[in-house]
Every structure is written in structure tokens, then in C-alpha cells.
Amino acid sequence: MSEKIMWLYHGSDVIVKKPRIIESNRLLDFGTGFYTTTNKNQAIRWSQKVMARNNSESSYLSVYKFQAEKEIKIKKFEKPDKEWLDFITANRNGTYMEEEYDIIWGPVADDNVYLTVKLFETGVLSKEEALKRLKVEKLFDQVLFHSEKALKCCEFYNFEIIGGDVFE
């Protein structure tokens, strides 16, 4: 992981100036923490989903400057491969008990990908078939801050008001 500055985005129905590690009420791809992405449009779409789910009036895009420090332990998945599929499946099942990371970075299981992963988890698809289907999907990334140490590398920069209209 290089130490250059990157821009990360978080979409929500609130402005998040001080990110924090959040224990979710559901099991997520990379576990608990603060989720961001390098894809601005993806974060905007997520803000619209959160606004609709919470019946909120507005949605926002929070923007962060990110620069990793050498002592930050990062796990990066380059593509949805066997290791990624095993990792997210274990997290979603609440069975991941291996090495802890400060930041986890990799493909996000969007709606299309989620269905493939769910079919794999329930035994409808074999691992090989699931991976074959995942190869044809255009996946965006997610960057999870999993520790307080990692959050110190994530500096709030500004926010944009997305509004109340659904983003297509």
C-alpha cells in the first residue's frame, strides 16, 4: 500500500465529521467498523439507500483525505477471488476468527454480487460457480476502517448535500 493521499467517500443521511467504529446490527462483508469507498457515485447511491431506509429528508456525501501510516495493518483484496469469498462469507456468518487488520480494502458485494454470494452461502452454487459468476461483475471497492488507529489516517475534508431525489 502506497502512502500517497487518497480521497474516500461515505454516503449517509447524516454528515460524518468524526468517523467511528460502529458495531452493526447485521453482519457485513468486512466486519464492524467505518465503511468508505474510493468511488464517489457508489457513495452517493448508498446515501440515497440510507435516506430511503431511514425515511430521512436528506442525504450527504462526506469526503475524507486518507494517507496510510506504515504501522497500519492493511488487508487488500484485488479481486473477488477464493480468499475474498471465504473472508466475506466468514464475516457474514459471524465465524471469522483469524488475523485482525486495521483496514480491509476490496470489492463490495453490491446487489448482483450479494445474490451470488447468498446462493453460495446457502449451498445452491459451488465455490467455483460463484467465483465464475463474480468474474463478470464490475465491482467497486469498499474500504473498512476497523480500528481506532486506522481512523486517525482518515481526515474529514468536507461534505456535499446530495438531497432528497433518488440518484440513478
Image: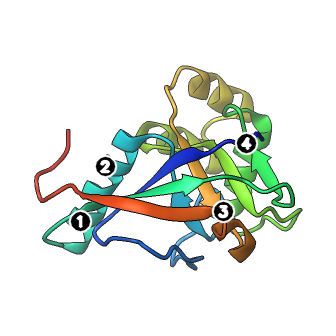
Quarter of the rendering containing residue 151: bottom right
SS class, disc 2: helix
Q: Which of 50 and 2 is in front in this view?
A: 2
Disc 4 is placed on an element classified as helix
- First in sequence, mark 3 or 2: give its number: 2
Q: Which of 39 and 25 is in front in this view?
A: 39
In the rendered image, which residue does mark 1 sit on? 51
* CA distance for labels 3 and 2: 22 Å
Q: How far apart are marks 3 and 1 (CA)?
A: 27 Å
Q: Quadrant for residue 112, please give it.
A: top left
Instruction: Classify 77 as above or below 158.
Output: above
Disc 2 residue type? Answer: Ile
Q: Name the residue under label 2.
A: 44
Residue 103 in the image: x percent, y percent? 71, 58
Residue 153: mark: 3
Say which amino acid is labelled 4: Trp
Q: Name the residue under label 4.
A: 84
Which numbered circle lies on residue 19?
none
Circle 1: residue type: Met
